[in-house]
Image (tube, rainbow, N blue to C red):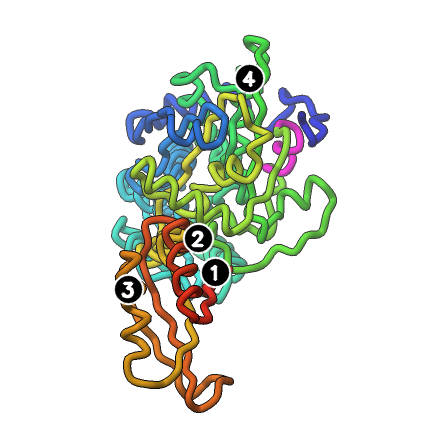
Amino acid sequence: MATLARTVDPDAMPVSIDDIHAAHARIADAIVRTPTLISRTLSELTGATVYLKFENLQFTAAYKERGALNTLLLMSDEAKAKGVIAASAGNHAQGLAYHAQRLGVPATIVMPINTPTVKVTQTQGHGATVIMEGDTFDAAYAHARVLEGQRGFTFVHPFDDPRIIAGAGTVAVEMLADVPAIDTIVTPIGGGGLISGMATVARAREAADGRPIQVIGVEARLFPSMYNRLRGTALPCAGDTLAEGIAVKEPGGITARMVRALVDDIVLVSERRLEEAVSLLLQIEKTVVEGAGAAGLAALLAYPERFQGRTVGVVLCGGNIDTRLLANVLLRDLARSGRLARLRIRLQDQPGALFNVARIFDQERINIIEVYHQRVFTSLPAKGLITDIECEARDRKHLDRLIAALGEAGYEVSPVELA
């Protein structure tokens, strides 16, 4: 059931289905027509029929190329000669820089000074001039607008621009062409450009053949900016989210209007669900996605009753994730499943104490990875000590058998839990 009141005429929107079809014809030869494939395992896991749109397979690993290229191709020769500028710390920067270089258009990207080095390097690798300015995106954005005026650049907004929205909507054109049976589209929301374009295509298809399509947006619970705008709530927008690509404090004006008119609902997902979705996509589909790219699957995991029995199209909108962060996410997922654990064990500080504990690990065939002894910084008596043992089990039941065996041997054991 829809929970947002769609009260605006879709025909009165700033972007039409004709704009999106024209954008698709314009950019088709220069972007990857990414596949839309069924995931049988995720379908069994969620109770929905799940199709994945692999936008992480674009050259710059994100759908952002589509809108950036559409915008560049619509610019005048004079504007192209002067160059473009954008403020971005991620996928928009790389997509714009890559296609600007292909077309011979000078590109300048303003990035916050805390942008990860890998993203700066990748953007520079596409030929853009990178300027580091400010501690936040807002500061970088303000500086980019100053340079726009001073140097005559054309500013390319990451989401609040009809040309960007039309390019983003081409994702849905391909998805519904490949799988006409899709009756629900689940799309991440940052500033709202992608879902505005996707929903425009969905409503046009709905009007053409009379089959309803639900369009559900997904935001990180830490950054519910579009949710707040449409529901009139004031939930805080702050925090260190895995889905930094959709961590937007203020959605666009154009996009908010379009989302209000065209989208059925917005749901919020926790950091734990985002981590789980990233891990599942790598384990099951053997594909790397960033936190924002996994938001759609995170929604299916968080609200299975909402999607059960439906044919769902999920956009994997980007795959640019730091490898160290990805490793951390995967290890945390292993810990939550019981395959990795840290057990805190109270021992007496005497010869053979650790050996006797290790024998129980051996008997239960559980591998010890690391051992940490703590004698000084503890509330135990001087002859007591705390030992943390990191270990690897087959699954949760296997780990539980080890904990039970340690307890039966008289040891006080407590797992160190993750948040």
Circle 1 or circle 4, nearest the eye: 1
Percent coordinates x, y for residue 260 in the rendering: 66, 33
Q: Residues within 10 Å of mark 2 (few under 14, many from 20)?
A: some
- Residue type at the position of mark 2: Arg
Residue drawn at point x = 49 percent, y = 66 percent: 135
Q: Residues within 10 Å of mark 4 (few under 14, many from 20)?
A: some
Residues at marks 1 and 3, CA–CA distance in whole angstroms: 19 Å
Percent coordinates x, y for residue 402 in the rendering: 37, 59
- Residue type at the position of mark 3: Ile
Task: Tell me, yes or no, whether the two marked residues, 1 and 4, touch with CB atoms within 8 Å.
Answer: no
Q: Is residue 249 above or below residue 178?
A: below
- Report the residue marked by disc 1: 418
Q: Quadrant of residue 307?
A: top right
- Report the residue marked by disc 4: 204
The first of marks 1 and 2 along the sequence is: 2
Question: What's drawn in magenta, residue-wise?
Answer: 255-262
- Report the residue marked by disc 2: 336
Circle 2 or circle 3, nearest the eye: 3
Under tag 2, what secondary structure?
helix
Q: Residues within 10 Å of mark 1 (few under 14, many from 20)?
A: few
- Report the residue marked by disc 3: 368
Residues at marks 3 and 4, CA–CA distance in whole angstroms: 58 Å
The first of marks 1 and 3 along the sequence is: 3
Q: Which mark, residue 209?
A: none
Under tag 1, what secondary structure?
loop
Task: Tell me, yes or no, whether the two marked residues, 1 and 2, touch with CB atoms within 8 Å.
Answer: yes
